[in-house]
Amino acid sequence: MTARRKMPTQQDVATHANVSTATVSRVVNDRGIISADVRSRVVLAIQELNYIPDASARALSLQRSGTLGAIIPSLNNAIFAEGINAFERAAQALGYTLILSVSQQDLAREHDLVIKMIERGVDGLLLVGNLHDERVFERLEQTGVRHVCTWAFDENTSSANVGFDNTGSMFDIVDHLTDLGHQHIVMLAGKAHDNDRARDRINGVRHRLESKGLSLPESRVVEVEYSVAQSRKAFNAIIDDKTTAVICGNDVIAYGALLEAQRMGIDVPGQLSITGFDDLSLSAELSPSLTTVQVGADVMGDTAAHQLIRAVENQQGVESTRLTTQLIVRESSGPVRSL
């Protein structure tokens, strides 16, 4: 059996570079004034010995772990992947590692995951939305772990937000469809229980329609999982002869509606307009391509990482940032048909 190779230590690096271990520590942690010659010798020694700094010792020195946590509701929605990819890229570029967990849209489970993140010593935490178990905020406040809530922006919340107004973001969709003459509109929404983003999008559609003298009664709203299969089933339950437009709570739901409409021989947009929300990359490639709302998940993830890390390193509060959304009009929406 081959003996396990001994990992090089900080003392080995110091001996190799002919400096003290304190100097090696200052180079590794980028602290103190060090001459260019000494720094280059230490860096070269680290490379030649393949030395890996002790993360726990470095964390103790810096009073930081160099890790960020992120808890997202689901892996089934591609929009979270886009945002988290951007978040991780920005964090890595700034020297931080990401720990990712999934709450399955369960607030009690999310609370337990937050505790585990704190126990692992994360420096900062990304959450999705503003609706969380109150104990989550209490724990974060007690431990001093900075956090940012994403995919939402509410100026009345006490937590830092990097995201967009889910209610107001639906106004452009409603305006677009009503300008095309649509009045008989239904909505396939995400599950609103424990999901403030889905709830706010429903409210946004309802309020905007009411401002135009129209309505969105409960009978014209069906809440579904973010699933193409579930959306197809719901589409059959809500569509009727009067319906001329379907507003979907996200693009995944819209994909199911579009597929089921095509299976039923319904012409989109000739007989029925369908809209989504998120602007996933697939949405532009469909036939017909999907009218949707672009939320800029990559910008959101990148901004959240920079704001969170700046707060951690400067020992200050996380700065909120309100992002804008944009209606992307494509082929799946058109003028109302003659009834």
Image: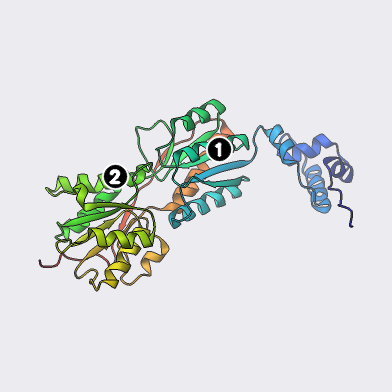
Residue 331 coordinates in the image, percent (x, y): 27, 68
User: Which residue was labeled with disc 1?
Assistant: 124
Q: Is the Cβ of the residue at disc 1 closer than 8 Å to that at disc 2?
A: no
Residue 186 coordinates in the image, percent (x, y): 22, 55
Task: Classify the position of the C terminus by image quarter.
Answer: bottom left
Residue type, numbered disc 1 = Gly
Task: Classify the position of the N terminus by image quarter.
Answer: bottom right
Image height check: is 39 above or below 140?
Answer: below
Q: Residues within 10 Å of mark 1 (few under 14, many from 20)?
A: many
Q: Residues within 10 Å of mark 2 (few under 14, many from 20)?
A: many
Q: Secondary structure at mark 2?
A: loop
**Which quarter of the figure has residue 115?**
top right
> 305 or 40, which is in the foreground?
305
Residue 125 in view of the camera:
yes
Going by the picture, which residue comes out furthest to the left?
Answer: 339
> 130 or 132, which is in the foreground?
132
User: Which of the labelled discs sits on residue 167, or is there none?
Assistant: 2
Q: Secondary structure at mark 1?
A: strand
- Measure how far apart labels 1 and 2 are at the Cα level: 27 Å
Is 166 situated left or right of 158 in this image?
left
Residue 104 coordinates in the image, percent (x, y): 47, 47
Q: Residue at x 30, y 71 (%)?
A: 288
Q: Residue at x 28, y 45 (%)?
A: 168
Residue 118 coordinates in the image, percent (x, y): 58, 35
Q: Residue at x 30, y 47 (%)?
A: 201
Q: Residue at x 37, y 43 (%)?
A: 195
